[in-house]
Amino acid sequence: PGSDAVLGGGARLQVTNALRLGSNAVILVEGKNRTGQVEGAWRGDGALIHAGSLHLAPGARVHADGQGYLGGADRGQPGNGPGGGGPAGDHGVSGGGGYGGTGASPSVRPQVYGGPAYGSTELPLDLGSGGGGAEYSHPGAGGGMIRFAVRDEFHLDGVVSADGEGASHSAGGGSGGSILVEAGLLSGSGVFRAQGGGTPEGAGGGGGGRIAVYYDRSDY
């Protein structure tokens, strides 16, 4: 209980029997290939957690918040990823990253584009995209990707999240990422979440991510 762990991007955690996360335990799932294309394509990756059963107590978290594609490095660069938000350029504010939903255009400069939606609704395995760059600002990175394969019961009383990162000043927020769950029995009263990141000064917020949950039986 209370222990922290980091699961690297592209990793697979396999537990033959039960994996239990006590109250306030945290697993961070990192992203891989977040900063640009690999061999001409966006090949970002998260991690797979494979267990006989999985139990998250109240207060426990498995998250990939802000572990997707990075935001644009300066005011002339869009966010990284297939749904990267538009850069500020001479407009002063930038657009939010897209993924499950389109990223928002800035309320004060609607001509700056928000990033487009992309990827699969049924098998969401993509990273979220970053917000557009802006001067003297930190754009939000997208949310990462977490995949669960649980043979028996997945009991969730905690939180599983792949939220996009919020931006500072006039940069765009990152889009939410991906959560894919395959379980025999889904139970508990916890939360799955893949929200887009916000922005404080009229720039575009990130679009939501994608969540797909498959199970044979449910007491959720």
Image (tube, grey):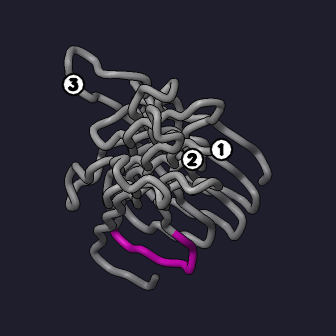
Number of numbered discs present? Answer: 3
- In the picture of the structure, the residue carrying the numbered disc 1 is 168
Amino acid type, mark 2? Glu
Q: Does residue 48 appear in this view?
A: yes
Q: Answer with left or right where residue 47 lies relative to residue 99.
A: right
CA separation, marks 3 and 1? 28 Å
Quadrant hosting residue 66: top right
Structural crowding at the residue carrying mark 3, measured as other residues with C-alpha within 10 Å and reported as few (<14), some (14–19) or many (≥20): few
Q: Which amino acid is tagged 1?
A: Ser
Q: Is residue 9 left or right of residue 43?
A: right
Residue picked out by circle 2? 165
Of the two numbered discs 2 and 1 in the rendering, the one whose residue sits closer to the viewer: 1
From the top left corner, tell me how far across and down residue 140 is, in percent. Answer: 54, 42
| Residue 186 % position (x, y) | 42, 74
Q: Nearer the viewer, residue 116 or 210?
A: 116
Span of residues in magenta: 184-191
Quarter where residue 120 is shown:
bottom left
Viewer-side residue, 139 vs 16: 139
Quick one: SS at disc 2?
Answer: loop
| Residue annotated with mark 3 | 41
CA gap, disc 3 and disc 2: 23 Å
- Density class for disc 1 (Cα within 10 Å; few <14, some 14-19, many ≥20) is some
Magenta segment main secondary structure: strand
Foreground label between 3 and 1: 1
